[in-house]
Image (cartoon, helix red, strand yellow):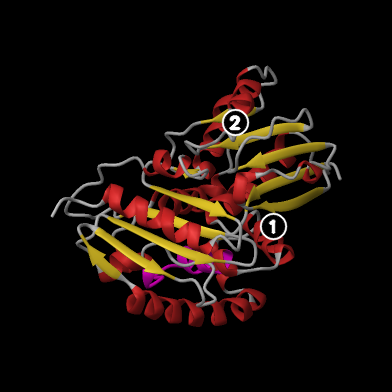
């Protein structure tokens, strides 16, 4: 394997970053490189599997730093980019000129494309639409909650597929499609349609489940998805039903973790007053100022519900 790209799994920005780095690497570094792709997911303790760094060259895009000398390239934009102080010190001591962080950029795809242009003189106009949509999606720069929940564009339909698809090999196909096709063209591919239709059907079932399970109080929407089989969901569903809310906090359970998700409403009548990443970091999680999450062991449901209640109490507005 000439190049291993590790990207944030089940994330439109992460998948887009992998596609952009692929085109950059082949245009600037090695046109014939054999490239392998590995999704990375946040787990309890955020432990990084160093065995995944199995390429002659290794890159991580849109995910935490790994203090390993086998890591060649790194691009991230999360406030919680470092698991430990030692990891941060390792990054700051690096002199390769191939590791980059900008916690102020709303999307990693846009940040990566900017660095490729500024530092390496590379730009590909065919990626402009992909970069713009990754920025909109990861930065939550939507016109409304309805735009996102109702999935009115090819990009948003593809986002839903990426978030719901379980097969990394199929996501790799999407990454390669992104290097060659427009988003409208990707959505029209028969193999995409075959996977997308049931995911869109499940999306609307999830919308209804969240509507039924949601409670709103003092500027916060809460819901518990444990036992529903729902592992992930469109983060704007709570604001679709509760436009008056400032925050939403939920707990869910997947095959490998219990997860507390915390988000803020971009259109809230009462503005956000807390840094969500800082709150999540106290429980071993992280994210951005406007959205974050905490990963616990799969069987730690009651602990997750306890953390959820504590966070809700902290961010709720006075009566």
Quadrant assignment, res 12: bottom right
Q: Residue at x 49, y 43 (%)?
A: 286
Quadrant assignment, res 58: top right
Q: Secondary structure at mark 2?
A: loop
Within-10-Å neighbours for mark 1: few <14, some 14–19, many 20+ = some
Distance, label 1 to label 2, CA atoms, is: 33 Å
Specify start and end residues of the magenta stretch as a single range.
149-162
Q: Secondary structure at mark 1?
A: helix
Q: Assign the C terminus to one quadrant of the image.
A: bottom left
Q: Position of residue 213 (x, y in %)?
A: 35, 75
Q: Position of residue 301 (x, y in %)?
A: 52, 63
Residue 229 is marked as none
Per the image, is 159 magenta? yes
Q: Is residue 209 toward the left or the right of residue 319 in the image?
A: right
Residue 116 drawn above or below residue 139:
above
Instruction: Evaluate whether residue 8 shows in this view.
Output: yes
Q: Assign the N terminus to one quadrant of the image.
A: top right
Q: Is residue 273 toward the left or the right of residue 78 in the image?
A: left
Q: Residue at x 47, y 36 (%)?
A: 79
Q: Residue at x 63, y 35 (%)?
A: 65
Q: Which residue is mark 2?
A: 84
Q: Which residue is mark 1?
A: 176
Q: Position of residue 6 (x, y in %)?
A: 70, 46
Q: Which label lies toward us, 1 or 2?
A: 2
Q: Main secondary structure of the magenta part?
A: helix
| Closest to the observer, 32 or 73 | 73
């Amino acid at each position: 394997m000439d190049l291993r790209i590790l990207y944030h799994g089940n994330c439109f920005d992460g998948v887009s970053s992998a596609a952009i780095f692929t085109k950059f690497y082949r245009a600037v570094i090695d046109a014939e490189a054999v490239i392998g792709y590995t999704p990375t997911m946040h787990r309890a303790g955020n432990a990084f599997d160093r065995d995944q760094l199995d390429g002659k060259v290794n890159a991580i895009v849109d995910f935490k730093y790994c203090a390993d000398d086998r890591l060649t390239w790194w691009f991230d934009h999360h406030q919680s980019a470092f698991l430990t102080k030692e990891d941060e010190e390792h990054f700051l001591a690096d002199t390769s000129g191939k590791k980059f962080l900008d916690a102020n950029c709303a999307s990693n795809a846009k940040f990566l494309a900017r660095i490729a242009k500024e530092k390496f003189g590379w730009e590909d106009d065919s990626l402009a639409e992909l970069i713009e949509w990754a920025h909109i999606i990861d930065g939550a720069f939507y016109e409304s909650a309805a735009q996102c929940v109702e999935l009115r564009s090819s990009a948003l339909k593809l986002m839903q597929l990426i978030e719901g698809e379980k097969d990394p090999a199929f996501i790799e196909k999407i990454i390669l499609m992104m290097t060659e096709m427009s988003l409208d063209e990707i959505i029209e591919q028969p193999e995409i349609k075959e996977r997308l239709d049931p995911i869109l059907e499940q999306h609307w079932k999830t919308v209804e489940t969240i509507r039924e399970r949601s409670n709103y109080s003092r500027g916060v929407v809460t819901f518990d998805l444990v036992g529903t089989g729902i592992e992930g969901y469109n983060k704007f569903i709570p604001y679709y039903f509760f436009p008056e809310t400032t925050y939403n906090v939920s707990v869910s359970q997947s095959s490998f973790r219990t997860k507390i998700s915390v988000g803020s409403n971009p259109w809230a009548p009462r503005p956000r007053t807390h840094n969500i990443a800082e709150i999540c970091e106290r429980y071993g999680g992280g994210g951005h100022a406007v959205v974050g999450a905490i990963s616990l062991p799969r069987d730690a449901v009651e602990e997750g519900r306890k953390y959820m209640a504590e966070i809700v109490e902290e961010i709720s507005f006075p009566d």
